[in-house]
Image: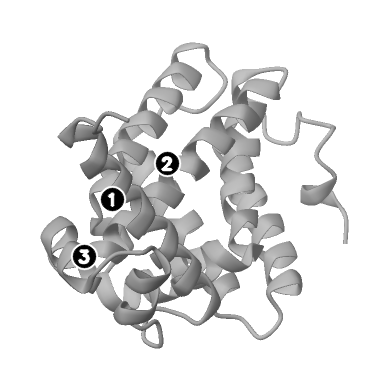
C-alpha cells in the first residue's frame, strides 16, 4: 500500500480536526471543549492542532468558515427557487435569519463566535456577503423594482439588520417566538425598498397578525 501524497495527508488531518472540533463546539460549547479530548477523538495530538491552526481560536475560525460556506450554499438554493429576483432576495435574507434557530449555527456562529472572535460584521466572510448583496440590489435597481438607493449602503444596512436579528434569536429565551417577530418586522422593512410597496400579494408575513 503506497503512502498518500503529503498534500492529501495535510488536508485529511485538517478535515479531521475541524470535524472533531465542530462536534465538540456544537455539543458542549467552545469554552468547555477540551482540546485534548477532541484531538484524541480525531486520533491526533494537540501538536497537530497547533501546527495546523495555531490555537483553539484558529480552529474556531476554521469551523465557522466551514459552517459559513454551507450556509452560503443553502442560501443560494433558496434564492434560485424564487420566481423573480426580488422574491429570491427576500427569501434568502429571511432564510438566513431563520437559520439562527438551528442549534449548531446558534451556538457556534452566533454565540461563541462573536464572544471569542469579536464583531461578526468585521469577519472576512462579511465582505463577500456585502459584495454579493450589493450586486443583487444593483440589479433590482436596474430593473426598476426598488427605489434608487446606493447598493453598498443598502447592503450594509440590510446585512447589519439580519445579523442583529440572528443574534437576537440565538440569545433569546424563546428563539422560535423571537424568530417569527424578527422575520415579520424585517420583511416590512425590506418592503420599504419597493417602488410599489405592498404589491407583493403573496406576503402573508407583512400583513397578518
Marks 2/3: CA–CA distance: 22 Å
Residue 150 visible in the current orientation: no
Q: In the rendering, which numbered label is found on residue 52? A: none
Residue 150 location, quadrant: top left
Q: In the rendering, which numbered label is found on residue 49? A: 3
Between disc 2 and disc 3, the foreground one is: 3
Check disc 1 and report the residue beneath it. Answer: 14
Of marks 2 and 3, which one's residue comes earlier in the chain?
Answer: 3
Marks 1/3: CA–CA distance: 8 Å
Q: Is residue 45 above or below residue 75?
A: below
Residue 10 location, quadrant: top left
Of marks 2 and 1, which one's residue comes earlier in the chain?
Answer: 1
Residue 198 image point, x, y percent: 74, 36
Residue in the picture at 51% in, 70% down: 26
55 or 198: nearer the eye? 55
Check disc 2 and report the residue beneath it. Answer: 69
80 or 24: nearer the eye? 24
Residue 177 image point, x, y percent: 76, 73
Amino acid at each position: 500500500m503506497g503512502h498518500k501524497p503529503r498534500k492529501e495527508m495535510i488536508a485529511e488531518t485538517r478535515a479531521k480536526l475541524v470535524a472533531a472540533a465542530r462536534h465538540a463546539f456544537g455539543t458542549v460549547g467552545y469554552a468547555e471543549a477540551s482540546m485534548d479530548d477532541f484531538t484524541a477523538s480525531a486520533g491526533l495530538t494537540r501538536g497537530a492542532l497547533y501546527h495546523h491552526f495555531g490555537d483553539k481560536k484558529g480552529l474556531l475560525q476554521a469551523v465557522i468558515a466551514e459552517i459559513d460556506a454551507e450556509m452560503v450554499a443553502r442560501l443560494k438554493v433558496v434564492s434560485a427557487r424564487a420566481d423573480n429576483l426580488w422574491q429570491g432576495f427576500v427569501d434568502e435574507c429571511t432564510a438566513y435569519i431563520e437559520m439562527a434557530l438551528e442549534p449548531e449555527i446558534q451556538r457556534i456562529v452566533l454565540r461563541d463566535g462573536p464572544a471569542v472572535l469579536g464583531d461578526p460584521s468585521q469577519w472576512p466572510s462579511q465582505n463577500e456577503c456585502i459584495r454579493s448583496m450589493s450586486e443583487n440590489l444593483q440589479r433590482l435597481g436596474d430593473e426598476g423594482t426598488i427605489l434608487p438607493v446606493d447598493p453598498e449602503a443598502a447592503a450594509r444596512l440590510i446585512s447589519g439588520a439580519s445579523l442583529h436579528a440572528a443574534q437576537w434569536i440565538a440569545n433569546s429565551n424563546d428563539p422560535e417566538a423571537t424568530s417569527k417577530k424578527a422575520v415579520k418586522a424585517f420583511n416590512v422593512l425590506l418592503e420599504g425598498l419597493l417602488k410599489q410597496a405592498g404589491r407583493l400579494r403573496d406576503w402573508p408575513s407583512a400583513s397578518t397578525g
